Image (cartoon, rainbow, N blue to C red):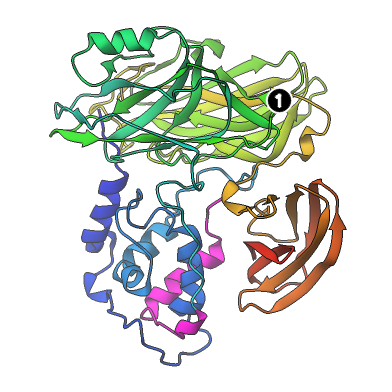
Amino acid sequence: MKTILLIFIAIAGALCISATGFSTSKIIEVNPLDTQTVAKSVPTYYEDISPIIYNHCTKCHRPGEIGPMPLTNIAEVSAYGAMIKYVTELKYMPPWKADPDYNHFLGENYLTDAQIQTIGDWFDAGMQAGDPTNEATMPTFPSGSALGTPDLVLPMAEAFEHQGTNEDGYQVFVFDPQLTQAKEVRAVEFRPGNPSICHHAVIAMDTTNQADILDAADPDYGYEMFGGFGFDPVDPLYAVWAPGTEARFFPPEISKILLPNSKLLMQMHYAPIPVNDTDSSYLNLFFAQTPSPRYVQTYTISPINLSTPFVIPPNTVSSFKGSSYVPYDISLLTVFPHMHLLGKTWESYAIDGNGDTTKLVRINDWDFNYQNGYSFTNLVKITAGSTVYVEASYDNTATNPLNPNNPPQYVYWGDFTGDEMFVGLYDYVPYQIGDEDLMLGSEELLIQEEQTDLYPIYPNPATAEVKIGFRMSDGDDATLTIYNNNGQVVEVLEDATYYTKGRHLLTYNTQHLNAGIYRFVIEVDGVQKSTKFVVK
């Protein structure tokens, strides 16, 4: 059995750089106020490195988040310069696992080869500071949430102490939203209190009060339960979390339903640890502001969808292919792959009745420490009569450094870290005409004053063109402008042009732009909101 390795690997890399081939003597102290002139060909922190770090790393590497060290200024970044070069060259960081050549998703966070080269060149040239006036703007990060201000926060009633017996722990905690009427939920965000021991969490919604009975019978806070909740909740897959997962908002027309007098159950899987440690995780709920008549459903592909037993023999790389028939038209929002330590690759796609393939997600180098639910930029239609496939491979050899058994042993399905899983979770709604135009977005890009949704630009980085989406809550004039990273106007797309209430999608050709960082700004009644994109 293994604990989550992320934090320990990162710390070890920071303290033992020499083991990677880098000498600690190469770490150079940089004066943040140093504005010495450097050759244009030599990357500098403020001009070249700060936009990469702030837009790809700081979200996790800041106080209170999962990253083991902060990367919020030149001094912090320079102190870990050698390690940053090393992990970016390996493409271990940033931890984006979905293959961008296969499909694109919201929140894509990977570095281009050019960006990786820039980081390496910067370190090799002595980590020059450059001109502080050219420092990239630090994104605004919400406190206590990656999405914004939640409508309801549900904390654990008390800290739970996970015993240091080197064994997995499964504990179910009951949360009472105290609702007297149904609420439509646009996002459920799990926030780990102690990321070093939180293996994964499954959130269920129930109205039977059976969890309260089980909780009362257990002397500890919550109740111990392996392999489920001890009964069948009304919605056993209300939300899921694993290291690396980022919560996403559903489109305004779509939500999860939270029934009156219901409870939310959080089954926490705690990783094996040698000494006692505590956790105080919590849930953030974001409610729909307008009625959303369509409710998200979830279906699963698991070993019951396999034609062969799910058994992984020792000293083998084993592959499995599962499938699920789709009887009616559906619109996919998110796909969530899940395996354990032996996982190697994971791919999902759909084939319709005509033999045409819809690519969903492919992971070429599975990492147990970085799992995610991948949200499509637009809803993906899967037609009736299609079959959804999952292909996964597992490395049960001695060369797999994460193999929990030495020597390798037979491994079967199970809930423990040393067991394995073959899971694909798919959030969907029954298809309606026009679903392909519905975009998934982040509420942190919301213009509150005008309630104008500005959605993430995709693809990002761009090579030829980008899609720019926004939604007007009311008909109004809007000005749309492209700026470069120096704040200069590149192009005015629309000047005080009237847009009707509803969603709008623009295609912007980027081939005439130089490589770099750009900003799209929408202005409505004097209120501006912007989002950045990168041109390769």
Q: Nearer the viewer, residue 395 or 252?
A: 252
Q: Quadrant of residue 305?
A: top right
Q: Nearer the viewer, residue 502 or 369?
A: 502
At a point 64% along the width and 62% down the height, the residue shown is 530
Q: Position of residue 275 (x, y in %)?
A: 12, 34
Does residue 83 appear to the left or right of 385 in the view shown? left
At a point 52% along the width and 66% down the height, the residue shown is 115
Q: Quadrant of the N terminus?
A: top left
Is residue 58 among what the camera can see? yes
Q: Nearer the viewer, residue 469 or 55?
A: 469
Please report the bounds of the magenta region as a residue range.
Answer: 108-134
At a point 42% along the width and 24% down the height, the residue shown is 202
Q: Is residue 119 above or below residue 189?
A: below
Q: Position of residue 182 (x, y in %)?
A: 57, 21
**How would you rate the neighbour count of disc 1 (Cα within 10 Å): few for under 14, some for 14-19, many for 20 or more?**
few
Kindly identify the amino acid type of the residue bearing the numbered disc 1: Pro
Q: Is residue 268 magenta?
A: no
Q: Nearer the viewer, residue 472 or 362?
A: 472
Does residue 248 appear to the left or right of 293 in the view shown? left
Does residue 86 appear to the left or right of 443 in the view shown? left
Q: Quadrant of the C terminus?
A: bottom right
Name the outermost residue toward the bottom.
37
Q: Is residue 126 magenta?
A: yes
- Secondary element at tag 1: loop
Q: Position of residue 61 (x, y in %)?
A: 37, 56
Q: Is residue 114 above or below residue 150?
A: below
Residue wearing tag 1: 293
Q: Position of residue 84 (x, y in %)?
A: 37, 63
